[in-house]
Image (cartoon, helix red, strand yellow):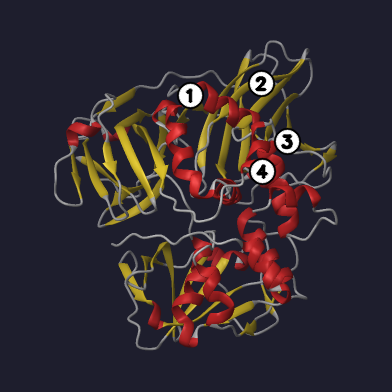
Amino acid sequence: MRFSNISSYSPILFFRRHRSLSISLSVILSLAIINLTFGCTYYKVQEVATSKETLGKEIDDFNKMGRYAIMHVGEQSWHLTKLVVNEDEQVLSGVALEIRPEHTYKKTRKSRGNRYQNKKQRPMDEIHFQLIPQTPVPEFGETVEIPFSRISSISINKKDGGTELATILLGTIGVLAGIFLIALALKSSCPFVYVKDGNTYSFAGELYPGVLTANMERPDYLQLHPKTQDPNELVVRITNELKEIQHTDLVKLLVVEKVNETEVLLDQKGNPMSFSSIQSPLKVIENGEFQKLEPALRKDKMAYAFNSLSDITANVKSLEFQFNRDDSAPDGKLYLTAKNSLWLDYTFGKFNKMFGTYYPTFQRNQQKSSAENSQTWMNEQHIPLSIYVETIDGWKLIERINPVGPLAYRNLAIPIELSNCPNGPINIKLETGFMFWEVDYIGIDYSKNDPAKVHYIEPKSAIDETGKDVTYLLKLQDGKYLTQPDIGNAVEVSFDLSHLDHSKIETYYLLNRGYYNYIRHYENEPEFDKLKVFKQAESFTEFSKWEYLVLMDLTGNTELASSYDN
């Protein structure tokens, strides 16, 4: 399987140069970012021709966002996951899967009047690739490569019954237009992790998210969910699929045993926490107003996106959740399912680009910065997800959740001490920067924490893509790194499970440490005057908010946004 990347593109610049498409495409883009499913239940298709002249110069700068890819050959369709674009070889690659139920419809997609169930189906998240008839149809689970020459058209759905779906016809510029829309499905990130399921690998998440220097390294616990399990071993693959250099110091498998009839998670410190009686919130409040409760009740990707504009002056966004109290419980455990947003990734890319040709120097200097300084800046910009509980003395900070990456939700456990809370319901507040996190599920458990046994297992073997044994680099936290500098680097790590009683296993975690550096070669001049603003607290979340307002054309006063815009 080949891995590659494309360079970033500015949607804002594109919209300004193409005003006729700005409204429809900006709405589609922002909906893709925040994964909303509310609104009308119709969409329609409109074909919009383009040319190399209008899009070619924009392709290299297009920023990578996420979409659900559906491939069509005649009457046959399938989902292509983990898309990778190789510009040099002009190939789109990924893994073919069966289309999920939320992207399956009774009737064939037509030019207009397509109806869908907005609580069960997600057409707004999709990108459709029409392939030429001679294209082979793969088996599910098969890794495929599709030359750009086989793509005849790409389309994306537009939400709202009164607006159109834009279709870019490829024709003689199939490669360029293909990259333009394929980029919606791509991003920049840390190492990708796949867990072996029989003869295939399933995407599990990202290692050490947001750790950009060695000084910032911290233990990270990534939960694994293998669908089929070899009783003797568990195998993961760690890959570099983007323009970055990845340094992995440690990977270790943690096997958590079952405790009665409970679900066991690890908190940020690696402590096991049992959940046996999770209670849903009674109310959700934002800026003093009640919000819909449904997104909190199920793990269905109907997430709270921290994007309210009810108070346009507020840079920091928060949600308050009210729970029934158990008077006999001195403490509780919060259960969260959350991830970072693709919007945070996009905004951070905009920020980095302001350094221009100075970026390599800035990056070298950052390697020398202390972990305390880096963490302080992140906290002041509200990049972590902060958890508060209401006490008799006001809101008390319980924990800050470090970034977890935007490609996969994580189940998070947060212990909460309740002895200083006032009588009545328990109030929990989640706080972060504008559109930095998405919370899919929340609950509280007052049951006693049952101790769970955790087995720590070192790698049995670690073999890279060249066949080299690199096991010694991953066994210990010793500053000896497995460095993956190039796209396509991969290491397959196996763990011996033969000594364990599988009837007692509850779940698996991959303990990992490391850091990564972006590879960026910006050609623009540094914008030092604008960058000085980011030394101030909340400046980055304010930048995020105003970038969004400009993108959505939701502000009549863009003076502040223009002061940041590059």
Q: Is residue 223 left or right of residue 539?
A: left
The amino acid type, in three-letter code, at marker 2 is Leu
Q: Secondary structure at mark 2?
A: strand
The amino acid pointed to by label 4 is: Lys
- Work out whether residue 171 or residue 37 is closer to the camera in this orientation and state it: 171
Viewer-nearest of labels 4 and 2? 4
Q: Nearer the viewer, residue 499 or 339?
A: 339
Locate residue 126, reporting x and y percent.
Answer: 56, 68
Residue 281 appears in the rendering: yes
C-beta proximity under 8 Å, tags 4 and 3 = no
Which mark sits nearer the N-terminus, 3 or 1?
Answer: 3
Give the class, few, some or many, for how many residues have Cα within 10 Å of label 1's Cα (few <14, many ≥20): some
Label 2 crowding class (10 Å Cα cut-off): few <14, some 14-19, many 20+?
A: few
Secondary-structure class at tag 1: helix
Residue 181 at least partly seen: no
Residue located beneath label 2 in the image? 397
The correct choice, above or below, for 280 with respect to 544 in the image is above
How far is mark 3 from mark 1, CA to CA?
A: 26 Å
Q: Earlier in the sequence, mark 2 or mark 3?
A: 3
Give the Cα distance between marks 4 and 2: 32 Å
The span from disc 2 to disc 3 (Cα, nearest Å) is 13 Å
Is 5 on the left or on the right of 195, as rendered? right
Q: At label 3, which amino acid type do we have? A: Ser
Q: Earlier in the sequence, mark 1 or mark 4?
A: 1
Question: Which residue lies at the image location 51% right of the left edge and 44% below the top edge?
Answer: 409
Q: Position of residue 1 (x, y in %)?
A: 28, 62
Q: Earlier in the sequence, mark 4 or mark 3?
A: 3
Foreground of the two, 464 or 525:
525
Q: CA distance from mark 1 to mark 4?
A: 24 Å
Pinpoint residue 171: horizontal percent, then vertical percent.
49, 87
The residue beneath circle 1 is 371
